[in-house]
Amino acid sequence: MRRFLYLATMSLVMNNPDFKELHANNVKVKKMKKMKSIMKLIHKLARVLVGMARKNESYRPNKVKPVDLMLHNLNK
């Protein structure tokens, strides 16, 4: 299970603009090491998938970004 979450997260970081932005923010702004950021995003992906399954909803990108990152983007 961990392997599949890791591979899915790596794919999201490379292809999904939301996860790519979250990873870049973790590495550049929060000064996290890349692997620690990936592990944090794996946990986020797991929470998103569980939430989607429980609420029977489809993926909504506005639910993925943290509030502080959204506020930062509004101020640009």
Image: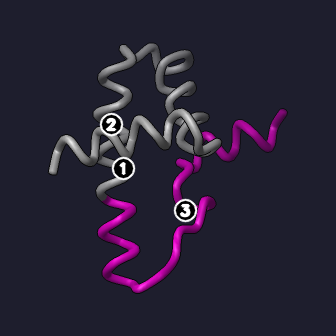
For residue 16, side relative to residue 54 (left or right): right
Residue under label 3: 63
CA separation, marks 3 and 1? 11 Å
The answer to whether residue 6 is above or below residue 23 is below
Where's residue 58, x and y in %?
Answer: 52, 76
Where's residue 49, x and y in %?
Answer: 35, 65
The image's colour scheme reads: one colour
Question: What residue is shown at x 84% (from left), y 33% (from top)?
Answer: 76
Q: Secondary structure at mark 2?
A: helix
The answer to whether residue 57 is above or below residue 60 is below
Q: Amino acid at mark 2?
A: Lys
Question: What residue is shown at x 20% (from left), y 41% (from top)?
Answer: 3
At label 3, counting other C-alpha atoms closer than 10 Å, the crowd grade (few under 14, some 14-19, many 20 or more) is few
Q: Secondary structure at mark 3?
A: helix
Q: Are marks 3 and 2 in contact (CB under 8 Å)?
A: no
CA separation, marks 2 and 1? 6 Å
The answer to whether residue 56 is above or below residue 10 is below
Q: Are marks 2 and 1 in contact (CB under 8 Å)?
A: yes
For residue 8, side relative to residue 11 (left or right): left
Residue under label 1: 44
CA separation, marks 3 and 2? 16 Å
Q: Is residue 65 magenta?
A: yes
Where's residue 66, x and y in %?
Answer: 53, 48
Label 3 vs 1, first from the N-terminus: 1
